[in-house]
Amino acid sequence: MAKSDNGTTRAGDVYQRLRADILGGRLLPGQRLKFPELCARYGTSVGAAREALTRLVTEGFVTTQSHHGYAVVPLSHEDLADLTFARTEIESSVLRLSVLDGDMNWEAQLVAAHHVLERTPFHGPGDTDHPGDAWAAAHKAFHLALLDGCRNRRLTATARALREEAALYLQWSVSFGREPDRDIAGEHRALLDAAVRRDADLAARLLREHIAHTARLLIRGATAEHSPADRAAAAT
Amino acid sequence: MAKSDNGTTRAGDVYQRLRADILGGRLLPGQRLKFPELCARYGTSVGAAREALTRLVTEGFVTTQSHHGYAVVPLSHEDLADLTFARTEIESSVLRLSVLDGDMNWEAQLVAAHHVLERTPFHGPGDTDHPGDAWAAAHKAFHLALLDGCRNRRLTATARALREEAALYLQWSVSFGREPDRDIAGEHRALLDAAVRRDADLAARLLREHIAHTARLLIRGATAEHSPADRAAAAT
DNA sequence: CATCCGCATACTTTCGAATCTTCCTTACAG
DNA sequence: CTGTAAGGAAGATTCGAAAGTATGCGGATG
């Protein structure tokens, strides 16, 4: 939303590192963020940490209560459902607009992103449960490319923000188990086809299903094993 | 989005007052917000002002660039079009969900809000151009009541945030001129009827038109007379 | 034995001067 | 006259200790 002044200021620096640590799973959901710890961890003063935290609060990665400090936002099935539903609504709307508004350059970038995604192996080396980093990056790039045709800054911004939040859940999903009968690559190809053929309604519908499908897997995985909240509590 | 800790902390207090001053038109769009001025105006220290500003940035009321300070967000026709389009998309979606999900209590609150709106005179005492404060409040309450049936926190939060942003444009619209053939009260009544009759699609369509209609008036008024940006620049 | 009160501790919040960056003015050379 | 560089002023950012607030523990009381 706001093109924050990252990198050039101390506070912006801490903000980025803190954000990366939360999204990267190095800080656990629900974990309290105390100033003494933060200052030691990032080698800054209280003021800088405070500013970084207030930004993360408005982005939904951190919660706060007066005089009770800050904490990484806790994960819950309920919240995942809320987030997923919001995403299906907004992302599909934005995609529809994207397909209607997108110019040829958008199409080209989209095809390019899909090309990369298609040729990137799903699994990282060794791990057969989680998707590899390379695939995750290509996947994200493809979906952002899908939305990029939409001319409306506010809509694309909210869609992207929700996607970032969803990344938190992906990080903490115990098992990103693949359904045997699911064909993720096929879903992406179908999305690409609908977009290039300018079938906005079909594209929107496909995206709704795509998101809902992934969310179902996450919820099932989290329910089957320990919930993220449990793990966080245990590790604290 | 975040239930910020207003009121209980110093920074939260400044945040609220600053926000009210921007929305109330006491701070001009595009105006720079320098720390010495702010500290004098609100009787606080640099730190508190800074935190308030960072929050307003993420809400879209203030902009910032590294080492270049903060400023009230500048208004423009382009941005108004962007905002209006985002609102038609999101508010209509949320209203559809609201009509589908809302329970009897929601219905009751909605009817109550409409009752108040219907009996509040449009014009304040004297002024025949701008709507009166009482009407504006009732109008806002009615529209919020419309959206309140939606169970999804994120969607309702974004819809409300966009409405707040729109309030900024309303504040600075030179002439909220009424079209002779427009029947605002009738539009509201139609919205209420569709909602109570649970016709989600009709309600959504009516709301789209309602928002677009109002925005057209704003744009026309702003184009006819001085643009808000001009006035802000002149007054600076 | 359970409950309540007060104290000690840890943490959050606040402050404003010191530091650093940027922008504007002015002087100088080409 | 134009373009460039140095100096100065204005303002943004940073720091960390002081002040304020909650939490948890221990002892006293019913």
Image (tube, coloured by chain):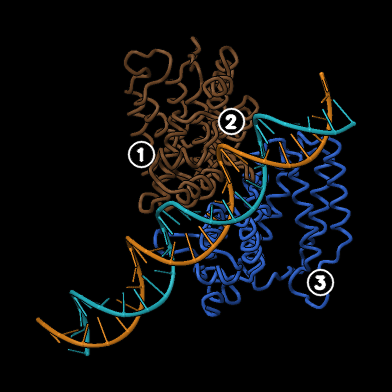
Chain colours: A blue, B brown, C cyan, D orange
Residues at marks 1 and 2, common chain? yes
Q: Do the residues labelled 3 and 2 touch (CB within 8 Å)?
A: no
**In which quarter of the view is residue B212 placed?**
top right
Q: Are marks 1 and 3 in contact (CB under 8 Å)?
A: no
Q: In the image, B119: left or right of B214?
A: left
Q: Residue under label 2, please give it.
A: B74
In the rendering, which numbered label is found on residue B109?
A: 1
How far separated are the C-alphas under marks 3 and 2?
Answer: 47 Å
How far separated are the C-alphas under marks 1 and 2?
Answer: 36 Å
Residue B145's x, y, as percent? Answer: 41, 38
In the rendering, which numbered label is found on residue A40?
A: none
Instruction: Specify the farthest residue to the top.
Output: B180
Q: Mark 1 lies on which chain?
A: B
Would you say residue A217 is visible in this rendering?
A: no
10 Å crowding of disc 1: few (<14), some (14-19), many (20+): some
10 Å crowding of disc 3: few (<14), some (14-19), many (20+): some
Q: What residue type is labelled 1?
A: Gln
Residue A93's x, y, as percent? Answer: 66, 41
Q: Residue under label 3, please give it.
A: A124
Would you say residue B82 is visible in this rendering?
A: yes
Q: Which residue is drawn at 73% across and 44% down?
A: A147
Q: Residue at x 41, y 49 (%)?
A: B12
Q: Which residue is at the front of the view, A132 or C24? A: C24
Check disc 3 and report its element: helix, strand or loop: loop
* Discs 1/3, front: 3
Q: In the image, B164: left or right of A144?
A: left
Residue B116's x, y, as percent? Answer: 32, 29
Q: What residue type is labelled 2?
A: Pro
* Discs 1/2, front: 2
Residues at marks 3 and 2, common chain? no
